[in-house]
Image (cartoon, helix red, strand yellow):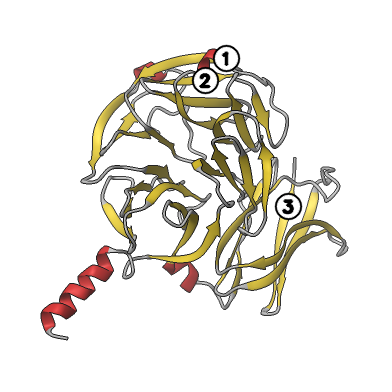
Amino acid sequence: MNLIKVISFVVFLIAFGFGGQWEETDRIDLPQGFSLRRFVRDYSGDLYLLGTNAVYKIDRRGKEISLVSDAAITVLIPTQRHGTLLVKDNGELIGLGQDIAQGKLPAVVTSNLIDGTAFEDSQQLYIVLLYHNRLAVYKNGVEQGVLPVQSRLLALIPRADYLDSQTPFFTATDNQISLWQGSDMTHPANYRGQNWINSKSYVSGLAAAPGGQLFLATPESVYVYDHQGNRQDAIGNNRRPSFGEVRTASTSDTIYIYDRNSNQILVYVRRNRLSAAAGPVTLEKNQPNPLESYTDIEFALTEPLEIRLVVYNLIGGPVKVLAQGSYNRGRYQLRWDGKDDGGKPLPNGVYFYRLESKKGVRIRQLIVMR
């Protein structure tokens, strides 16, 4: 192979992600014959798939698929405290987690609805809906305001404070990404948008990560941008163009990409997070700690393993099984609400969570303080 061919080959690898910061760690098969419209990842790590006539759930390991609803669902909205919300065609909200205060939006809100998302403060849930020509914000089923915008895609930064006028959100048309700032979600009409990123290809998916990174999916690649709009990396598709939607995990280290050709969801993990693991298994400190309403527990595997992750009380009694079974190589983040296996809130105090596998045991301490 001559020098020119070697250089061309290296450039090809870099351009298509094989020399970049991301590594494919798993592929999740969608149900046979299922036509995906949208998918979301909820805060517990499960995936929800919206099809033409059904909603399916795939557990955080990508192993088990179950039918959630065969009703006419318009959009899926992941929330921190209420699980994933299903918005029916008539405006009814179905909460797959805890009950919600207002169980219905005005029926008119589902007309020309494209997508939806949500953010939460300490007490309130705000639902943000994107239409063909506007963005609307609802609190307790009451419209807070409308922002005129022509867009197909919407991305909010997970867990960000959208009652702060400095917190941006993003929209996308066919090949242009806009950044919106200068107001808060209680006064959406006061936002001001600016052209932020221009894509040479059609934008098929858009997602933001907690650190402010933006993931822009085109049929041939997913491009990673930092919070200032500088491109950091590209995750390539070495098959014919087929990438669709992209979703992030609760951290900036794992993303999920829908591949139309294979009808699979591809899982990519940032390489340096896997290589930084202390041996084949890493168990991180939970955040937040102490636990008030919930806490996130993250672990990483550098090889496929059978694992068991359990919370124990101070005298060594198991109170909650968080994860059990076969997990692929990758990083996982689980959300726990401080309840035992019977659904009862645990009393305040000190607890331990223990991750067991054939590669050893990892133990961390956490505090419940409501």
Instruction: Identify the residue under disc 1.
Output: 107
Residue 44 image offset from top left, x and y in percent: 63, 48
Q: Residue at x 32, y 48 (%)?
A: 218
In front: 158, or 148?
148
Instruction: Identify the residue under disc 3.
Output: 367
Q: Residue at x 53, y 43 (%)?
A: 40
Pointer 1 local density, CA inside 10 Å: few below 14, some 14–19, many at least 20: few
Q: How far is disc 3 from disc 1 in space, using C-alphas?
A: 43 Å
The amino acid pointed to by label 1 is: Ala
The amino acid pointed to by label 3 is: Ile
State the image quarter where residue 70 is shown. top right
* Mark 2: secondary structure: helix
User: Disc count in the image?
Assistant: 3
In front: 260, or 347?
260
In front: 93, or 119?
93
Q: Which numbered disc, 3 or 2, marks the residue closer to the eye?
A: 2
Instruction: Identify the residue under disc 2.
Output: 110
State the image quarter where residue 64 is shown. bottom right
> Answer yes or no: do the residues labelled 3 and 2 have beta carbons within 8 Å?
no
In front: 140, or 40?
40
Q: Tell me: 1 left or right of 174.
A: left
> Answer yes or no: do the residues labelled 3 and 1 have beta carbons within 8 Å?
no
